[in-house]
Amino acid sequence: MTWTLVIQVTTASDAMAAEKRLAYLVSDVDIPFWSILAEGIRHRSEDLGYTITVHSAGNQAREELRLTVEAIRAGVEGIILSPTNSSAAVTVLDLAGEAGVPVVIADIGAGADSYVSYIESDNDQGAYDLGHMLADAMAERGWSSGTVGIVAIPQKRANGKARTEGFLRALGERGVRAAGIYQQSDFSYRETYDYARALIDQHPELRAIWLQGSSRYRGALDAIADAGRKGEILLISFDAEPEFIEMIASGQLVGAGMQQPFLMGEKAVETMDLHLRGAEVGKVQRLSVLAVSRDNLDHLMPVIQRNVLGQESAR
């Protein structure tokens, strides 16, 4: 699905503010992480007096390029980009550069460095922390000899590579073996179910599945249940869904590496605004990933509600 959402934000007392226009190009705003990041962009734009146009490419690189041209022709002052993948981002950066339009990258990464700033989650450290969290949970159950399967986001993405590397490094330090890895392409329930079931069927010693994305977690849970392995295979995830709070509290989910998309969206707009006003900004800005388990859930809840789930944006 491809659509364009226009959000008009103006400051009543300042006609000039209404002329400040930015575009947010996002791989697929139907995925909760991106919709929350878009909300963070909208929230900070309201404070800074920008008009924001959100273009969602439906996870299609060709559509992403068409929307890039559309945004440039509309005369935006800057583009915030969450690309379909890191290699596709190169063409977007080239088009924007030819038009003299600055670009701030918000997550995913890019295969070129002709952007103003790259705002990323610390995917490597977040995944590393999750690897140790999972190893602890397996050790508590006497399952240290079991293996871990991975349902990954595309490894063409810089963030996907960082997650895999950090997680495997932690497992290696704990002597836990990885069973295998499947890369998602359409991020559907069926794909997640099929990959999780394949890991279960191919690896009888499997004791855990790690999802590098959160939106189709139900597919993994159903695969575990349908294989008759409920209570025998743990699930741990990167990213977060609102229902993860209860799932972590109840032990249904070992934990989650929660990025802070609302904060990332705010930071992207602030960075673009500083650049447009002539200030220097950091080439790379890294936000922490919250490694959330039942042990620290209550302590982290205020941060989770605002920066992870975007639930404080109306306040």
Image (cartoon, rainbow, N blue to C red):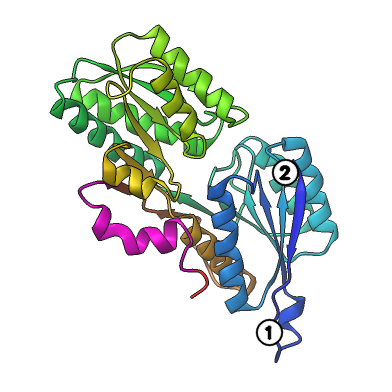
Give percent across and percent down for residue 19. Answer: 77, 77
Using the image as rendered, state which of residue 105 and residue 186 is in the foreground: 186
Using the image as rendered, state which of residue 297 and residue 134 is in the foreground: 297
**Residue range corresponding to the magenta coloring:** 292-312
Give percent across and percent down for residue 162. Answer: 42, 35
Residue 169 quadrant: top left
Whether residue 311 is in magenta: the answer is yes
Give percent across and percent down for residue 17. Answer: 71, 81
At x 44%, y 51%, the residue is: 242
Numbered tag placed on residue 57 in the rendering: 2
> What kind of residue is marked 1?
Thr
Q: Is residue 91 visible?
A: yes
Give percent across and percent down for residue 62. Answer: 77, 36
At x 65%, y 78%, the residue is: 49
Determine whether 185 is above or below 252 in the image: above
Whether residue 229 is in magenta: the answer is no
Instruction: Give the structural element (helix, strand or loop) at label 1.
Output: loop
